[in-house]
Amino acid sequence: MTSHHPAATSARTLILGSTSRYRRELLSRLNIPFETDAPDVDETPHPGESPVDLALRLARAKAVEVATRHPQAVVIGSDQVADLEGMPLGKPGTHERAVEQLTRMSGKTVIFQTAVSVVCLATGFEQFDLAAVEVQFRTLDAREIETYLRIEQPYDCAGSAKSEGLGISLLDRIVNDDPTALIGLPLIRTCRLLRAAGLPLYGAHA
């Protein structure tokens, strides 16, 4: 812990600024106590905004918005945007949009840009990072797309596929340096940011 982050940081509440059950399950793997709070953030892309810029902006916005209500806490914000040939693809929300997304991604390489931001207003700490996951989709026919979507209903997932479930069957390969990033929260980078914020990951077990 550096002098920039006082010892009191170790006693600060950790808050995940998300309602995503996938991110909650991932953060739970660290076996450290945390709370969740839903960020109130407009996720509409800005005109001409790249997938990387969108993911980073939203991750930071989510963390900051929640931190304004919990200024003493360490807050995690995260966002994932599917990058198809430079165009952002978010959560489909509906069956029809999911069909459209998977049809467009069929046979193509998609980069899933997963950003994470950690903010603590009380200490002035704010850092972010990004994990890019390269995913090669198989060539999919209309029947396969329809069947998959009816079974798994991944309408709350960027790119309309759950790699941790049946969605893995739609893929040819995955290339990345953090296996949790594709699910929605890059834990390697998250741990790095939490340590930088002065939050001891092993504090509860020391």
Image (cartoon, grey):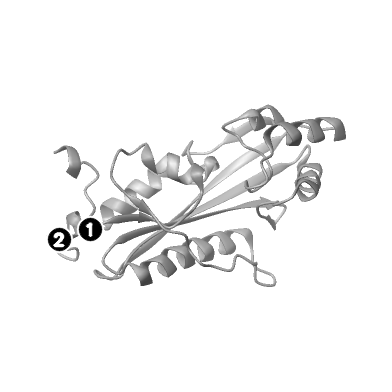
Asked if residue 98 lies left or right of residue 158, the reply is right
Asked if the residue under mark 2 is in contact with the one under mark 1, i.e. CB atoms within 8 Å, the reply is yes
Give the residue at mark 2: 8
**Occupied quadrant, residue 110:** top right
Q: Is residue 40 above or below residue 179?
A: below
Asked if residue 18 lies left or right of residue 135, the reply is left
Tell which of 79 and 67 is nearer to you: 67
Looking at the image, which residue is at 47% across and 45% down? 23
Furthest-right residue in this view: 142
Looking at the image, which residue is at 35% across and 59% down? 75
Q: Is residue 193 above or below residue 69?
A: above
**Occupied quadrant, residue 146:** top right
CA distance separating discs 1 and 2: 7 Å
Q: Which mark is residue 32?
A: none
Q: SS of the residue at dot 2? A: helix
Q: Position of residue 4 (x, y in %)?
A: 19, 66
Q: Position of residue 77 (x, y in %)?
A: 44, 58
Q: Position of residue 22 (x, y in %)?
A: 50, 42
Asked if residue 7 lies left or right of residue 51, the reply is left
The residue type indicated by label 2 comes to Ala
Looking at the image, which residue is at 80% across and 44% down? 99
The residue type indicated by label 1 comes to Arg
Give the residue at mark 1: 12
Q: Is residue 47 above or below residue 198?
A: below
Question: How many neighbours does mark 2 have within 10 angstroms: few (below 14), some (14-19), or many (20 or more)?
Answer: few
Q: SS of the residue at dot 1? A: loop
